[in-house]
Image (tube, rainbow, N blue to C red):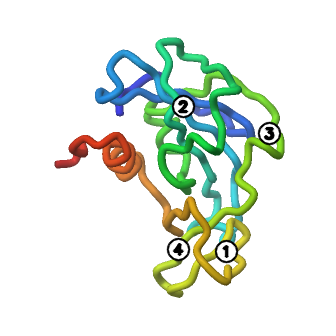
């Protein structure tokens, strides 16, 4: 990921952020903050944020919000701390209150420690529900690798 603009502003549910990867050329890609400052149990680490990353690309830094849909997720939902914003990899570009249609009906994460599937409240699920993520804190480096994999290119860490 390329550095855009570091920021220390507190995250809010509904924040839309831009990021750029070389594989997308001059286009920006986008994500959205779904939950902030999650408690331990709902997330792998206290204070995690739940985000979505979308496949939508634009030459403009601010996306058309209607293009950011749960049907266009680039990767399954991710848990992340504030580092991508602090380092400047994510730049908040607009805020819009989350509507029910902006959020998946069910979140699913595989918890490798307990070997079960859980939702974003830590409740055990009877079965895997797609898209299913991993119950682990991602770093901006692992996010970059996941984005590269989703785009079908070699990860930057190789």
Q: From this viewpoint, is residue 6 visible?
A: no
Image depth: mark 4 or mark 1 in front: 4
Query: For the residue labelled by badge 4, is the local secondary structure a helix, a strand or a loop?
Result: strand
Where residue 9 sits in the image (x, y, percent)? 65, 32
Image depth: mark 3 or mark 1 in front: 3
Marker disc for residue 12 = none
**For marks 3 and 1 on the same chain, the one whose residue lies earlier in the sequence:** 1
Query: For the residue labelled by badge 3, is the local secondary structure a helix, a strand or a loop?
Result: loop
**For marks 3 and 4 on the same chain, the one whose residue lies earlier in the sequence:** 3
**For marks 1 and 2 on the same chain, the one whose residue lies earlier in the sequence:** 2
Q: Which residue is mark 1?
A: 41
For the point 21% across and 44% down, the residue is 154
Q: Which residue is mark 4?
A: 110
Query: For the residue labelled by badge 2, is the local secondary structure a helix, a strand or a loop?
Result: strand
Where residue 130 sits in the image (x, y, percent)? 58, 63
For the point 75% across and 57% down, the residue is 105
Q: Which residue is mark 2?
A: 30
**For marks 2 and 3 on the same chain, the one whose residue lies earlier in the sequence:** 2
Marks 4 and 1, how far apart at CA: 13 Å
Q: Which residue is mark 3?
A: 98
Q: Is residue 1 left or right of residue 10?
A: left
For the point 65% across and 20% down, the residue is 64
When asked about the image quadrant of residue 108, the answer is bottom right
Front in this rendered view, residue 72 or 141: 72
Which quadrant is home to the N terminus?
top left
Where residue 74 sits in the image (x, y, percent)? 48, 43
Q: Neighbour class for label 1 at 10 Å: few (<14), some, many (≥20)? A: few
């Amino acid at each position: 990921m390329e550095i855009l603009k570091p920021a220390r502003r507190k995250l809010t549910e509904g924040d839309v952020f831009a990021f750029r990867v070389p594989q997308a050329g001059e286009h920006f890609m986008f994500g959205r903050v779904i939950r902030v400052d999650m408690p331990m149990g709902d997330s792998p680490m206290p204070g995690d944020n739940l985000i979505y990353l979308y496949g939508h690309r634009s030459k403009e830094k601010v996306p058309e919000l209607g293009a950011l849909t749960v049907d266009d997720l680039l990767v399954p939902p991710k848990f992340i701390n504030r580092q991508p914003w602090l380092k400047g990899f994510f730049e908040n570009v607009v805020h819009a209150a989350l509507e029910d249609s902006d959020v998946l009906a069910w979140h699913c994460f595989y918890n490798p420690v307990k070997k079960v599937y859980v939702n974003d409240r830590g409740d055990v699920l009877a079965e895997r529900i797609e898209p299913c993520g991993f119950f682990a804190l991602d770093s901006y480096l692992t996010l970059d690798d996941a984005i590269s994999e989703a785009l079908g290119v070699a990860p930057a860490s190789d």
